[in-house]
Amino acid sequence: MTGMLSRTADNLYWLGRYVERAENAARLIDGTYHLSLLPITPEEHGELWRRLFQSNEELELFQNKHPGFDDDSVVEHMVLDPENPSSIVSCMDAARDNTRAARAELTTEISQCMNQTWMDIRGINMDKIHERGIQDFLDLIKERAHLFQGVIYGTMRRGEPFLFWEMGTALERAENTSRLILARSNSFHRAHRRDDGFDFYRWGTFLRSANAYSAYRQIYGDIDPVSVAEMLILNTTIPRSLLACIEDTTDILKTLRREAQCAEMSERLAAEVRSMRLDQVLRSGLENFLHDFRNQVHALSDQIRADFMMVR
Amino acid sequence: MKNSDDNEPPKPFDEMLEPDGTVRMAYAQYGEWLHGTSKDTLLRKDEQADMMFRRLGITFTVYGDAESTERMIPFDIIPRILDPHEWDYLSRGAIQRVDAINAFLDDVYHDQAILKAGRIPPELVLNNDAFRPEMLDLDLPRRVYGHIAGVDLVRTGPRDFYVLEDNVRTPSGVSYMLENRQTMMRLFPELFATNHVAPVGRYPTELRNNLKSVAPVGVDDPTIVLLTPGRFNSAYFEHAFLATEMGVRLVEGQDLFVDDGLVYMRTTEGPKRVDVIYRRIDDDFIDPLAFQPHSMLGVPGLLSVVRRGRVTLANAIGSGVADDKAMYVYVPEMIRFYLGEEPILQNVPTYSLRNPDDYKYVIEHLEELVVKEVHGSGGYGMLVGPKSTKAEREAYAQRLKAEPEAFIAQPTLSLSTCPTWVEEGVAPRHVDLRPFVLSGRRTTVMPGGLTRVALKEGSLVVNSSQGGGTKDTWVLER
């Protein structure tokens, strides 16, 4: 590797993160949309969002503006609110900004794809969402995120810029998946199982939120919370499992610079996750494990900055 | 002179059609094609072109316009075509000017022979804001200051080309020359099969070789970067485009730093030395330690490295003293003094308002003249006399009175027109031309350039910030 501009590396890293984050938000809303078709209480529905926002420290922002967790409030917050840095609109703005900043390292196709998406969602508001249907809008976001990632895979040279983008995507996935599990951490106990078929839908929705539903059905068949946890934490064939994300990150960091401190850190974290005893963790507290995991991911991204971004 | 009973102003020279309606040589093939092409086809091509530019995200920023800070420069699908003879004449003239300007810059920062010889008033150079005493007695590689120049030309007749200005600071627009050509080749491949259009695509390679040839002494394989003010700058697209096409890093001031007499960039592998900087930041902002102290765009200490000869800036600091609108008057003099030749291209007669006689004339003839700020650019703050209202002229006269030395005036030239695709179909619109001249090992000019077109009927202002568009410029090889 010959060394790219630190600032551009940072732009590409965040480009990866923001596009993945937007797609993740679309999936989360989509999942609860399915959920609301089921006989689920509004309280349970609201509790889910409350925990999701809490894990991302955006609960206060939400509650300052919205009295309850009704559909429109959630969509307003997750899709449209420019003050919410994780809303789809904020993410796409940031992604476009990073695309422009890193333009000289990207192919024309990548810039074009981002511009087209930005033109298509520019000026979106609640009326327009109601008009076309939220489902349609979420599909557009997911489709464009996949297209964008596909264009990068298909057209970009496998050099440093690509690797920084890929790493941002992997770390964002690790964060999103850990957050998703965290929001439901108290439901993984066997004691909480309900056997009325409702659980099947609830966990199905959960898996869809992690883009892992059909994979789960292929690997495990019947829905069972322990298997769901095992898959999303440990199964390395699932691109958004915690272990897969950290292993991807480790590989990338080693390719960038084998002796970098962050590469070692990442490898250690992967080994830790790999050797975890799931049954024990589920008994003693999934929350602690996830908090610890998230702290380590944050420390890892700080170390990446220190190692590659010439942080002053 | 006009007859008093001649009310109709004479029709301006048209690039395609003679006054009697016959098609000029340059347009012989194209004119036939245009004649046989339906309005519907042109309309469709125009829409396609628009979509292509939007998706590419080719935008520029309009300052002082909060509503839409990002706009596209309209692209016109009808090319501006020059025949080989016209181009031969033009390109020789443009190279001659840039050679003289580089000789002048080397002179005023060394012996100042032209000032001593009394050919240019010394105070005009030495008191000029763009003159940088910091550059005195510094020997630049190959004695080149303006490595990249954009010479703005207008035409009033078959052999009548006038230079409006020689941009030797940080001229922009070359990305439009390249993108316009690519767009035209995608829209009208059949036209390129029948017309022998000189290619312009190797410009980035030539520019890179050119920059390489002016690397500091002893650096064989220089690291070249393009320094941009950042993605909020009006020409950011062009900066990113050129960096990609040249295969060099696009850096901002914050990416560079000076240490122990050298310039470095911050990379993922640590500091990396930089040898040549193609900078698109003005002198004032390039080094907060030497010039504007509050500039966040530049690199503190950069000038000190330039002075040690350990980094080359293109264009060199202090080049602006040559393209000042007041200095423009003396370019023909520079050509005679340094090259011993007669100017190939003409200057527009220019009135310097610092001169009392000129001042008086201008005030009395505002309605016929174009008045510009000496330090202005981009068409901002100019008065086009024949298109102005009485109130505008009176307000402008107040500004002239307050600060006469800040203005020059020129007669309104009857700019040539070129067929252009507008709402009602194909119609003549006024155009100018900016060829790009590169200086290094030798001085060259790409066969083509940026043709700007005033899209509003009758308008003479081609600047993109004032509603102008661009055209592909074809130089025919035969």
Image (cartoon, rainbow, N blue to C red):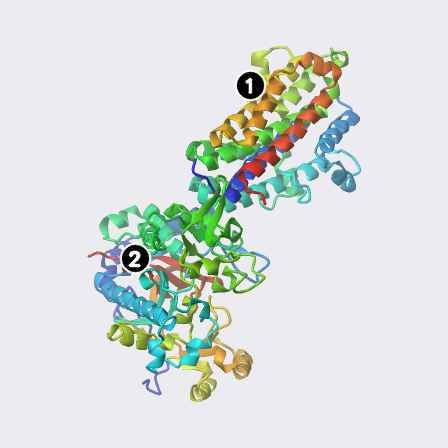
Question: Is B10 left or right of A269, judged from the image as shown?
Answer: left
Q: Nearer the viewer, residue A154 or B206?
A: B206
Distance from label 1 to label 2 (Cα)?
55 Å
> Can you tell which mark lies on residue B446?
2
Residue under the image location 35 percent in, 87 percent down: B4
Q: Badge 2: few (under 14), some or many (20 or more) residues near its Cα, within 10 Å? A: some
Q: Secondary structure at mark 2?
A: loop
> Can you tell which mark lies on residue A295?
none
Q: Nearer the viewer, residue B333 or B3?
A: B333
Q: Secondary structure at mark 1?
A: loop
Percent of width and height locating residue B366: 46, 82
A74 in relation to B395, above or below: above
> Badge 1 is on which residue?
A236
Percent of width and height locating residue A53: 72, 33
Percent of width and height locating residue A292: 69, 26
Q: Nearer the viewer, residue B36 or B130?
A: B130
The chain letter under disc 2 is B
Question: Is B267 left or right of A62, judged from the image as shown?
Answer: left
